Image (spheres, grey):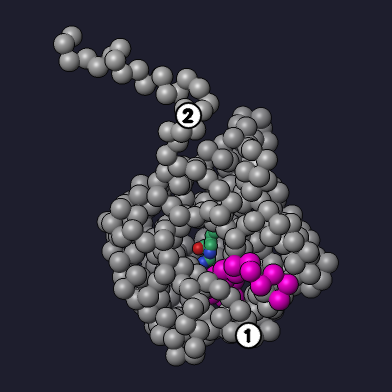
Amino acid sequence: MSNRSYPFTRMRRMRADDFSRRLMRENTLSVDDLIYPVFILDGTQQREEVSSMPGVERLSIDLLVEQAESWVALGIPALALFPVVDSAHKSLLAEYAYDPEGLIQRATRALKARFPQLGIVTDVALDPYTTHGQDGIIDEKGYVINDITNEVLVKQALSHADAGADIVAPSDMMDGRIGDIRVALEDTGHHNVRIMSYAAKYASSFYGPFRDAVGTAGNLGSGNKYTYQMDPANSDEALHEVEMDLNEGADMVMVKPGMPYLDVIRRVKDNFGVPTFAYQVSGEYAMLQAAAANGWLDLDSVMIESLVAFKRAGANGILTYFAVRAAELLKNQ
Ligand code: PBG
């Protein structure tokens, strides 16, 4: 065996001690990587557990602002806001999505007033506001009409920006919405409002617990989002979407879901080198929580391992329901 490198090379030498493991570590997770998604209720002093997402609560704005104190203290850079919209406010044309006194608009103002440094990310999509739970305005056959939907998304994004949102995050997957929103933000003087595009958003069954959390599961029923969200079998298509969204003025792009799509994150990062985010979605969270609740997995260690994996895949940051717990663990490590 003339060309064998062993024993001159022993891979285990560098793994033998903590100090050398630390020195050769290629990726690190920090609190700076975390965006915390939260679910918001109307009213005051309202707090509800989400049964399919243990440890996640829906909170009214007053309680949200109270809780946010500790998240800010942990150093979490940003929150992503999602509304639980009362059925009285749902309609075919989703008018409540751009109501200046809507739930998200009020929550954004309240959070920015109390924590000016905390980044606020708002979701731009119509599914919480439509009676049918689709992300846009539908025709008589139930097909989401692209360009009419974009007009409403623009109004929604502007109302978020007016309320003080730092980042608007279109998660609807309509064609051309990034460009329409960018032009409207420029025209109204919101030059520094960032757009985080859900560029590669797949038609995934991992969103189930989220649809429970925001109460859109019942509206959507047996419907699906295949005519606008991407086929999980594709990744060249993700690069095409990302390229278009960047050309239309996105500042950051996202791949969603997270763990089953790490290959897509890596391709996006390698091809474009732009700020790239991963969304570890509700179903991924529920899966790990359920296994941990059964004593089958150690929650803290699989949580950190899954988050580091996003960094290794090339993500600059991660939207995760584990953000608060992970920040606590990182602080004490
Ligand atoms: C709405 C939206 C969804 C999620 C984020 N924004 C659900 C969907 O597209 O049906 C899912 C997030 C999660 O599962 O954690 N457009």
Disc 1: CA contacts within 10 A as few (<14), some (14-19) or many (>=20): some
| Mark 1, residue position | 99
Q: Residue at x 56, y 36 (%)?
A: 302
> Furthest residue to the top?
1
Mark 2 is on which residue type? Arg
If the image is split into quadrants, where does the N terminus sit?
A: top left
Q: Nearer the viewer, residue 292 or 251?
A: 251
| Helix, strand or loop at mark 2 | helix
Residue at the farthest left position = 2
Give me the disc on residue 21. Answer: 2
Q: Secondary structure at mark 1?
A: loop
Q: Is mark 1 within 8 Å of ligand 1?
A: no
Task: Answer whether residue 256 is visible to the viewer in this image.
Answer: no
Q: Is residue 178 magenta?
A: no
Closest to the observer, 181 or 287: 181
Magenta stretch secondary structure, dominant: loop
Quadrant holding the C terminus: top right
Give percent across and percent down for residue 243. 30, 66
In the image as oriented, which residue stretches furthest toward the right?
45
Q: Where 268 falls versus 198 (above or below)? A: above
Q: Which portion, as a residue range, is magenta?
A: 113-132
Instruction: Say whether disc 2 or disc 1 marks the residue closer to the N-terminus.
Output: 2
Residue 135, horizontal then vertical, whole percent: 50, 71
Q: Quadrant of residue 101?
A: bottom right
**Left/right of residue 190 with respect to residue 91 in the rendered view:** left
Residue found 41% across the figure and 19% down from its top: 13
The residue under the point 75% across, 67% down is: 65
Q: Residue at x 58, y 75 (%)?
A: 165
Magenta highlight on residue 123 = yes
